[in-house]
Amino acid sequence: MIETDEALIENNPYNDNNLHLKIALLAENDGKIIRNRRKVKNSKSLMSWYSLVSIAILRYLQFYEEKRSKMKASILVANVIFRKSGEKDSYKAACLRSWGTQYLETGLLPEFRQGKHAKVMSIISREDVRQTFRTYLRGLDDKDRSPETFVTALNDELLGTIPGAPVSICRDTARRWMTILGFRVCKLKKGYYTDGHNRDDVVRYRREFLEMMETYDIKMRTYSGNDMEEETLPILGEGDKEVVLITHDETTFYANDGKKQMWLEEGMAKISAKTVGTSVMVSGFICQCHGFFLLKRGLWPQGSPPLRLCKSCKDKIPHNDREQLGYGPNHYMRTQQCCAVYILSQPPDFLAQKEWLTEVVTNKDDCDIIFYPEFHCELNFIELVWAFMKAFL
């Protein structure tokens, strides 16, 4: 703190005599600090704060003594000392003008106010309150969850049940609380991607899968050469059987699958379909003996009903009751072929079909079924076949 003789201060604290004297006192008191300004700016101690403020006030008063206006002098010092940018007034520039006037009037530097403001704990910092708010937000339908809905519920109901809560809050506070509670504004997407490669159970099964494949690999044929024309038979021990790998996967082809880019003459345009179109699911297998082949049942002859779920089946109405309930011929009631779901549920082999894994494992002693690790579709080489086929659609 710096004290001066009050007799020197007149009605105008910026008079030449008072200004010159205060600048001299401030420069003499902080001369060493001024020459080491970079070190002062990087320090966070209390004395460094007072030193930085004294430098800023000194520069401000010196610029004013050089016949610059208070506004220009304060903005210039704020840009240099407090690293503000631009030619407009800022909070630090306004503080400089206030600090300079106070120093000229009293000879005292401004009080260090850090830690002296009122400490008010927000209710959102309490775990029980956050849990109450999360429960409410999770109970809302996704399309109805918003800051507007949340602030209405808070002001009308929730805040009244929490001791120490404010009477009401604004929409911006509700939005900030939703962010603290873990909710974000997300753009709706048609797909969802989750990377589970490093999940504990996935890593554990991946190791087991690789160990199993290593034991099978020594019993498989290997191929080499530019065209894989050289075949090497495995060396089997007594009682061992050769292992044949058959991989399986399914994919879906759409009627409007095709190129998304093409070369067109300048001035020409081609409009793509708005939807992906009708789809067909294909189940494929790859075997080193038989190559690639598809599983096809042939249950959908020409002229059959459309591949969709009709309203009567969607409503789970028995076929015998559909005529009485007003389901007309548009639902193929009289042919007993209303939709794909019903037709596929009626063949005797479908009705008597066991779960396919159970049937294969129980009927074949020399057949093992191994699932690929989750999130590791790249291990299934049939994906290359699907990519090749879709590239030519």
Image (cartoon, grey):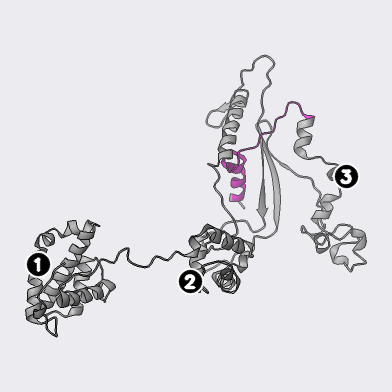
- Mark before the other along the chain sequence, 1 or 3: 1
Q: Mark 1, residues whose alpha carbon is within 10 Å: few (<14), some, or many (≥20)?
A: some
Q: Which residue is mark 3?
A: 348
Q: CA distance from mark 1 to mark 2?
A: 47 Å
Q: CA distance from mark 3 to mark 2?
A: 63 Å
Viewer-nearest residue: 129 or 210: 129
Viewer-nearest residue: 277 or 171: 171
Counting from the top left corner in percent of width and height, residue 198 is at 53, 41
Residue 200's place in the image compared with 191, above or below, is above
Counting from the top left corner in percent of width and height, residue 348 is at 88, 44
The amino acid marked with disc number 2 is Asp
Q: Is residue 388 visible?
A: yes
Residue beneath the point at 9% across and 75% down:
5
Viewer-nearest residue: 362 or 107: 107
The mark found on residue 161 in the picture is none
In this rendering, position of residue 332 left or right of residue 96: right
The amino acid marked with disc number 3 is Pro
The answer to the question of whether label 1 and label 3 lie on touching residues, with beta carbons closer than 8 A, is no
Quick one: SS at disc 3? helix
Counting from the top left corner in percent of width and height, residue 13 is at 14, 81
Q: Mark 3, residues whose alpha carbon is within 10 Å: few (<14), some, or many (≥20)?
A: few
Q: CA distance from mark 1 to mark 3?
A: 103 Å
Counting from the top left corner in percent of width and height, residue 63 is at 13, 74
Residue 270 sits in which quadrant?
A: bottom right
In this rendering, position of residue 325 left or right of residue 13: right
**Boundaries of the magenta span:** 363-390
Q: Which residue is mark 2?
A: 172
